[in-house]
Image (cartoon, helix red, strand yellow):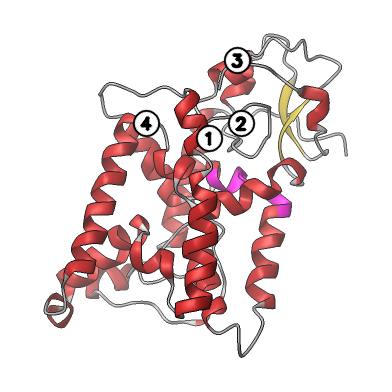
Amino acid sequence: MDGLKKKFHMSGRRYTQLITAVLYNCNILGFAKGRIYKGNLKGICAPGLNCYSCPGAVTACPLGSLQSALVSAKYKFPYYILGTIILMGLLLGRFICGFLCPFGFLEELLYKIPSPKLKKNRLTGILIYFKYFILVFFVIIIPLVSFSPGFCKYICPAGTLEAGIPLTLYQEPLRMLIGRLFYWKVFVLTAVIAGCIFCYRAFCRFLCPLGAIYALFNPISFFGIRVDKEKCIHCNACIKTCLMDTKKVCDGECIHCGKCIKSCPVDAIYYGTDRVKLKDYKTHGDN
C-alpha cells in the first residue's frame, strides 16, 4: 500500500475529536444520576486520556489501568494492559493525541480563548522532557513502591474535571471527605487550564505521561504523517508552522494534526501507512 494520500481537513479532525469525546462518555444515565458505569466495556482501554471514574465513561483509561496493574504487579504481571498500550502506540503513536484524546480536544478549545500566546521556544523545547519524569516517577515508581496510583492521585487534571468535581457535587458523602488532596488537585486543574489558554496544549506537551508513552512509538507507528522524500526541499515550513515542539516531521512531539500538510509548498506531506525514515527528513528549524 503506497499510503493514504487523501488529506484530512482541520474541520474533519475537530469532528473526530468531538465524536471521540462523546463515544468515550456516552453513559448518559451516569451523568444524570452521578454514578460510575461498571459494565463489561470498562475492561477495555480507550486510546486517549479519559478518566475511568467519569460518570459518563464507558471504557477504562490506559494510564489508570496501567497504574492499577503495576500496584498488583507483585501478584500478576500486567501483560494485557502493557500489550494494549504497546499495540495502540505501534499502530497510531501520537495520532491518538491529535485525534482521539478528549482532554487534548479540550486543550485546543481553551487555546482559542483570546489571550497573549506563548510561542514555542528554547524553554518549551526543554520542558517537553518533564512528561517523561512524570511517567517514570508518578506512573511507574509510585505504584510499584507505595502501591497507589501516583499520577491519578496527585496530578491527573482529567480525573479532577471528569470525576472528582462531578462526583463530589452529586454525592454528599464524598463532599464530607474533601480535604487537602482534593484542593491540591483542583489547583493543578486550574493551573493546567490557565496554561492551556496561553500555551498550545501545555498539558499534552509538558506533563502528559500517556503522550510520553506514545511519543516513544511515534517514529515507528504504522499510520500517521508521512513525507515524500523525493518532493521534500527541506525548507522547514512544516516545522515553523507546527505549534508543537517538533524538530522533525513525525518525531516524538508530532501529534499528526495536519497543519504541516497545508504549509508544505511542494505538497510533500500526507497521511499514510508507509514507515517514515526520519534521518531522510531532518530539518533544522528553531525549536
Where does label 2 land, which residue? 8
Where does label 1 land, which residue? 12
Look at the picture and state if 86 lies above or below 240: below
SS class, disc 4: loop
Task: From the viewer's perspective, tell me whether residue 234 is left or right of residue 104.
Answer: right
Q: Are marks 2 and 1 in contact (CB under 8 Å)?
A: yes
Q: For the magenta stretch, what is the residue range?
A: 90-97
Q: Position of residue 287 (x, y in %)?
A: 55, 23
Alpha-carbon distance for marks 2 and 1? Answer: 6 Å
* Three-letter amino acid code of the residue under disc 1: Gly
Q: Along the line of sight, which residue is nearer the eye, 165 or 44?
A: 165
Q: Position of residue 144 (x, y in %)?
A: 53, 76
Give neighbour class at mark 3: few <14, some 14-19, many 20+ (Cα, 10 Å). Answer: some
Instruction: Name the residue rendered at 77%, 10% in the picture.
Output: 233
Instruction: Name the residue rendered at 41%, 50% in the picture.
Output: 103
Alpha-carbon distance for marks 2 and 4? Answer: 24 Å
Give neighbour class at mark 4: few <14, some 14-19, many 20+ (Cα, 10 Å). Answer: many
Instruction: Name the residue rendered at 35%, 69% in the picture.
Output: 153
Task: From the viewer's perspective, tell me whether residue 121 is left or right of residue 107.
Answer: right
